[in-house]
């Protein structure tokens, strides 16, 4: 019974079960034709937007950099002890975040 819990055998059993469930689902699913309504985007009954909310990746990178600085700074502060160096580090971290937010 212990051999069933080995990762390779459990993975193979899982793959077989997933295949069987997929085949069963394919047999039970109704077949429908392709229509324009079926291929269109659904936006809760509203027309799909025609323009991008924020063109490009620049806004994403600003937010990603903000959280990277915040999380890595918190990680460095949590691993270090309380010392005057940490106060300087915290003030530089706050200045970097303010410069990132303001622009």
Image (cartoon, grey):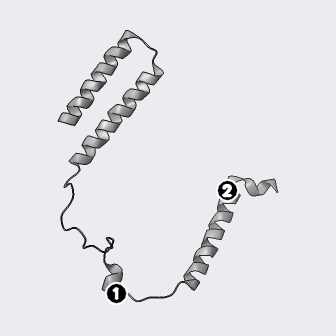
Tell whether 60 sits left or right of 1.
left
Residue positioned 80% across, 53% down in the render: 2
Q: Nearer the viewer, residue 44 or 69?
A: 44
Helix, strand or loop at mark 2: helix
The residue indicated by pointer 2 is 8
Q: Where is residue 95 shown, x and y percent of the image?
A: 24, 25
Q: Nearer the viewer, residue 56 or 100?
A: 100
Tell whether 86 sits left or right of 9.
left
Q: Where is residue 53 shown, x and y percent of the image?
A: 21, 58
The residue indicated by pointer 1 is 35
Q: Is 102 drawn above or below residue 10 in the view shown?
A: above
Q: Nearer the viewer, mark 1 or mark 2?
A: 1
Q: Where is residue 20 shown, x and y percent of the image?
A: 63, 75
Q: Which residue is at the far front?
A: 45
Other residues around mark 2 within 10 Å, as few (<14) / some (14–19) / many (≥20):
few
Q: Quadrant of residue 18?
A: bottom right
Q: Is 46 drawn above or below residue 87 in the view shown?
A: below
Other residues around mark 1 within 10 Å, as few (<14) / some (14–19) / many (≥20):
few
Residue positioned 46% across, 23% down in the render: 78
Q: Where is residue 13 shown, x and y percent of the image?
A: 68, 64
Tell whether 49 sits left or right of 44.
left
Tell whether 31 sits left or right of 73.
right
Helix, strand or loop at mark 1: loop
Q: Earlier in the sequence, mark 1 or mark 2?
A: 2
Residue positioned 40% across, 89% down in the render: 33
Q: Which residue is at the far top?
A: 84
Q: Is 29 drawn above or below residue 22 in the view shown?
A: below
């Amino acid at each position: 019974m212990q051999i069933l819990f080995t990762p390779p055998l459990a993975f193979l059993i899982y793959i077989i079960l997933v295949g069987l469930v997929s085949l069963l689902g394919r047999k039970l699913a109704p077949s429908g034709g392709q229509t324009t309504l079926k291929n269109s985007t659904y936006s809760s009954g509203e027309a799909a937007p025609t323009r991008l909310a924020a063109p490009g990746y620049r806004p994403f990178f600003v937010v990603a950099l903000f959280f990277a600085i915040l999380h890595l700074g918190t990680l460095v502060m949590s691993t270090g002890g309380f010392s005057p160096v940490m106060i300087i580090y915290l003030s530089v971290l706050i200045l970097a975040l303010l410069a990132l937010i303001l622009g």
